[in-house]
Image: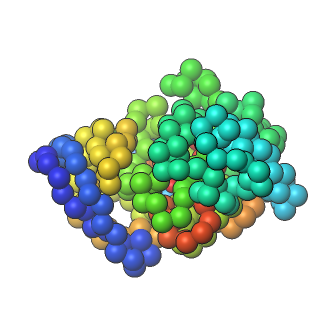
Amino acid sequence: MSGQRTIKFFIEKREMECKVIGEMRASEEVCLLSQDDNLLEDSYYDEQGFGVDLLFNTEEHTYLKDELEQLVKNRLSNFTSKSLDGFQLERYHEFITDEEHLIFMSSIKSCIDIQEFPLDKDSIPIRIGEIINQKLGLSCEGMDDREFFCLRLVRPQKHQDCNPPHKDIYIDRLRNAVNLYIPICGSDEHSSLSLIEGSHKWLESETEVSENGVEVNGVKYSVPAICGTKNDFNLSRPNPKVGEVLFFSPYLIHGAGYNFNNDITRVSLEMRLWKS
Ligand SMILES: O=C(O)CCC(=O)C(=O)O
Ligand SMILES: [Fe+2]
């Protein structure tokens, strides 16, 4: 099926609509997770597909935020026409126009080299590995062992800043991993990443999936969108607090982390770990 249509789902009981333009693809009666590494299988979190736990103390979090603020400010100076005096991450949306934001985001889409990560990068796979009982690392063969982290800046009330509900694993190189969502600022019950508990174990035939390159609310995405489910299409927001991490299976339906706040940008880090 092709053409334009409106998909509907709920985020914490709030009804959302997205305009989707693109082809749908056939889906099989198979659970993709059962063919790959399930990094949560030896943990308490296997059934729900995600968990929240402590990652940084207050001092580490403050340092991380300050350093990322400086990193964004330095990079932003090449993209925005506005003065960056008094720049703060949570006020990012005041320092950039719509057009400049989309260009800036596509410039950091391929993510930032791990050398620029402000804290000890190796402590992260160790800590998550302890929680889920795995030996983990930041590098993956499918990515030429390149190690990186990604930054997400989601402006308030701008629905084009967010990806639609999706599973990362439709992109081959993102399979076999565990994903991390690390809140930096502005991440709360109205803006943090949403997901469908347990959906990592659904059969493909239980969802309606678009082809790659689908357009959602006027923006093209490289990852296919989940456009419908046979089960309830209800997403929830686990809402990790400052200093915590949300770790989740990339086979889980997630995304649609719209920022419903009025005046604060949500900034979060995205990292992926694989078996090492
Ligand atoms: O933070 C978001 O809104 C999206 C994150 C995401 O899709 C991911 O980490 O794979
Ligand atoms: Fe994702």
Left-right relation of 261 to 21: right
Q: Nearer the viewer, residue 73 or 151?
A: 73
Residue farthest toward the top in the current orientation of the protein? 144
Query: Percent position (x, y) of residue 145?
Result: 61, 23
Q: Residue at x 54, y 59 (%)?
A: 155
Left-right relation of 100 to 11: right
Left-right relation of 111 to 217: right
Q: Residue at x 53, y 50 (%)?
A: 97
Q: Residue at x 26, y 57 (%)?
A: 19
Query: Percent position (x, y) of residue 211?
Result: 25, 40
Query: Percent position (x, y) of residue 118?
Result: 80, 41
Question: Taking the image as drawn, is residue 88 in sight?
Answer: yes
Residue farthest toward the right in the current orientation of the protein? 59
Q: Is residue 15 above or below residue 274?
A: below
Q: Quadrant of residue 113?
A: top right
Residue farthest toward the left in the current orientation of the protein? 1
Left-right relation of 197 to 243: left
Q: Quadrant of residue 73?
A: top right
